[in-house]
Amino acid sequence: MMRKVKSIILLAAVAMVALAACSSRGAVASDNKVEETDAVLDTASLENRVQEIYGAVFKVYNEEDSLRNLDIMMENGVYQHRGDFAANYCSREWNELVNKVDEIDSLYHADDMGFWEFDYWIMGQDWHKLSISDVKVVERTGPWASVELKLHNFDNVTPLSLTMKLEDGTWRIDDFVDLETSAGLKEDMKEYIANETAEAKKK
């Protein structure tokens, strides 16, 4: 009788251990599903953020283009909004570099084009029927992410990569990279500032 009781207790203990193991595996699987869901939501929210940024910027560009085609000058157009676009949608370092480049150009290149040979928002000098498509997050590491998209201007399509940075809880553009040339504007600005500063010291 004693042996039978011990066997029953042993079987019950084995069953409890097995149940606990299954429960633990279930919890891990559940946690993994939560993490996967969070990652998907993160990706979707970042892609939506890029759509939101370009939607707001291109709204002004396309409105000015429509009025221009009617020979109407827009009072508060693209040129007046460029500073706001950078302040609202780009990183602090991007804004610091742009401000430094603009300062250098105002001092040494007031009579020529200076650094900006094209508008980085439209990847060109003129625009018509601006839009973006195929927005996708290709990499995400902590507060940094890489997002690729296709920028449509006239009949041209420019594959573009954006380096995104999370600042104060908001995703902002930290760099614009033309995927056809692999050229990042941030490094170009840094090099330009260094060269212009060196030249100014020689004078």
Image (cartoon, rainbow, N blue to C red):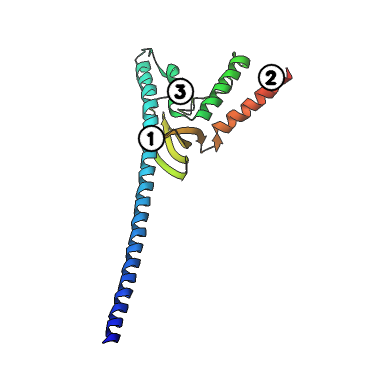
Question: As displayed, is residue 136 above or below residue 200?
Answer: below
Q: Earlier in the sequence, mark 2 or mark 3?
A: 3
In contact (CB < 8 Å): disc 1 and disc 2: no
Read off the residue under disc 2: 200
| Mark sitting earlier along the chain (1/2) | 1
32 shown above or below 115:
below
- Quick one: SS at disc 2? helix
Crowding at dot 3, Cα within 10 Å, few <14 / some 14-19 / many 20+, comes out as few
Q: Residue 186's spot in the image, x, y percent? A: 55, 31
Of residues 71 and 100, the one nearer the viewer is: 100
| Image spot of residue 193 (x, y percent) | 62, 25
Q: Where is residue 122 in the image (x, y as percent from the top left)?
A: 45, 28
- Residue 63, label in figure: none
**Farthest-out residue, left:** 1
Identify which residue is drawn at 49% across, 28% down: 120
- Contact between marks 2 and 3 (CB within 8 A): the answer is no
**Tag 2: Cα neighbours inside 10 Å, few (<14), some, or many (≥20)?**
few
Q: Which amino acid does label 2 sit on?
A: Ala
Q: Kindly identify which residue carries mark 1.
A: 49
**Dot 3 lies on which element?**
loop
141 left or right of 63? Answer: right
Whether residue 71 sits left or right of residue 139 in the image: it is left
